[in-house]
Amino acid sequence: MLSRCALIFLLLGGRLAAWDMPADWPLNAPTPAQIAIVLAAADQEGWPAVAPALRLKALRAYEANRPDAAGAWLGLARWAVLLGEPENHFVPRWIDAVVAARANHANMPRSYHPPGTPLAAHAGRPLVAWLLGNPKFTDKFFGVLSPCDYLPAVLDILDQIHTAEPARFQTYAQLALAIAVVYDVPPPPGWPHGQVSQAALPRRLPAPTEAFAFFAQADQAGLTLQHLARLDADVLKFVVDAAAPFPELKWAQQSVRFPLPDLVRSYEAVSYRLDRLQAAQNDWPGTTYTLPQILKEGGICVDQAYFATETGKARGVPTLLFAGAGVDSRHAWFGYLDGQQHWQLDAGRYAEAKLVTGMARDPQTWGILTDHELMYLADGFRGRATYPLSRLNTDIAAAYLAVGQAPAAVTAARKAANYERLNSEAWETLLDAEHAAGADARTRETTLREAALALEKFPDLNAQFRQRIADSLRARGETSAADFEEKQIARKYQDGRSDLGIATAVTAMQRVGADQTVAEQMHVFGQLMNQIDHDAGTAFFDRVARPFVVRLNHEGHPTEARAALAQTRNALNPAADSQLDQEMGKLAATLK
């Protein structure tokens, strides 16, 4: 049968010809026999030779209005592109993505020396055959994949687990994927929180195969509160990122038995140490940091949150440790996925502290994930019938871009956005396609406004798109219009989401440079102070005021630095002896 689909591998002017797929293959989803032929072709000629024909098949099926076939062929094409990419091409792009996302950290290697072999070298033939034959896993894989995922390690981990437990891999493929995208790089030094020493909490992830066996066995033994085989990798990653070692997790399975509806009690089970609060002892004082020890000795809020998240993970519950800044203090709490598959994000959160935004670690990238972003990721629009069509058209638009057909990419991306207005990836792809098609700045600003309006119920995304409008206006010389746009963002979210106004203020202060006089810098700072709500409190001090005061003092302007700090204190009016009041006092002492 292989002779009927002769494989063409011709070097023409330095270019590699694509595999010549048999013309008599109908525009249906690929059959197992056809997948076997594709796999044999890749074995003989390499994945780069196979990928163009697979992509072309997907585009032809799409143009023939065969969405199911188009999606299946496109899945094969995406595997071919991924597996065929040389590792020394992938790694520089991955490094750029990690740096852009500010996800690089001290525990990552300082340098990489990747070989020129394709990424397929990290996946054995049995795993590759399984991947190509499982379109549902393919869809989930590319749906969860991030530019910050280190693919050589992701494939290595999947291959290790598949080789060690092929039968259990079938049932727990999403668990394996979650482990792969979390364990691909080491965790950062401050994970899961920075108020315990490295000696007391070593912060080491276990071997991937051991983690897979631990969680799969716990699920099969009925020790988990969630059915892990039913969850996808995008939530299971908040289970497998446990920092506590397996003996402590096993202890938690037996000793911390709160039912899922009452999981908040695991936070309250750790008695609060008022003596540490009064002594401003924020770091764990002991030389070891174990779950039984925390339960016995008590702790402050961050220890309560750590205990709750780790004991939740031990019982198969996706959990996150949140930290946030309120009016005049900081606090830590936790979130978890409940029995109805809804995120509960306020366990241990104090309403009176007015904690606007909770910040957690995304274990997939080790970057920052807010509770508001998590709510977007968990929104129900992905369950609507139109969402798969939006996803397909988004992916097809990217495929058109890959072959240089920008106008067709614009059309497909526009369909994607129309099918599901809340699909932010569709809007991003449309903007990329418009750029590739040569659309001018005004056209792209119109699209940005459409996206901002479509995503208005998600303030973070709405503000991000509107900030990009301001950036575009500024880039083409419309400075007043850009300033007005940024002020509108701050005003829109002054009540309830002051953190977004702070983000705009940070951007504005970053533009204040040496070309402006100190008086001009103080004027900009004063304007920002007038736009920020009192509830911004600690967050405004941390992100805007303190950096500005420190910079003024460092540059030899202590009088202005003291004036800026006094202005901040007057505007925020922290409670006497509060954490914010004390930190302002410490900063003032450095300025004398």
Image (spheres, rainbow, N blue to C red):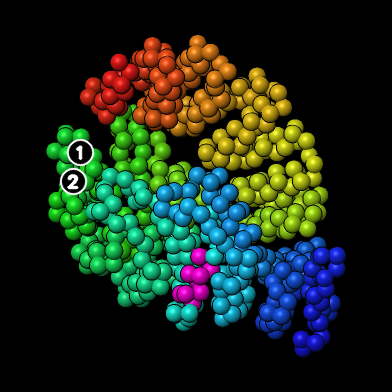
Left or right for 342, reference 23: left
Residue that badge 1 annotates: 281
Residue that badge 2 annotates: 285
Compute the Cα span from label 1 to label 2: 8 Å
10 Å neighbourhood of mark 2: few (<14), some, or many (≥20)?
some
Left or right for 160, reference 60: left
CB within 8 Å, label 1 to label 2: yes
Q: Please say if 284 is above or below 483.
A: below
Of residues 469 and 148, the one drawn nearer to the viewer in this rendering = 148
Which residue is located at x 62 percent, y 50 percent? 425
10 Å neighbourhood of mark 1: few (<14), some, or many (≥20)?
some
Which residue is located at x 45 percent, y 32 percent? 499
Q: Please say if 339 is above or below 163.
A: above
Which residue is located at x 76 percent, y 67 percent? 52
Of residues 273 and 353, the one drawn nearer to the viewer in this rendering = 273
Residue 555: quarter of image: top left
Image coords of residue 367 (percent x, y): 46, 48
Can residue 368 be seen from the camera position used here? Answer: yes
Of residues 87 and 497, the one drawn nearer to the viewer in this rendering = 87
**The residue stretch that appears in magenta:** 153-162
Q: Amino acid at mark 2?
A: Pro
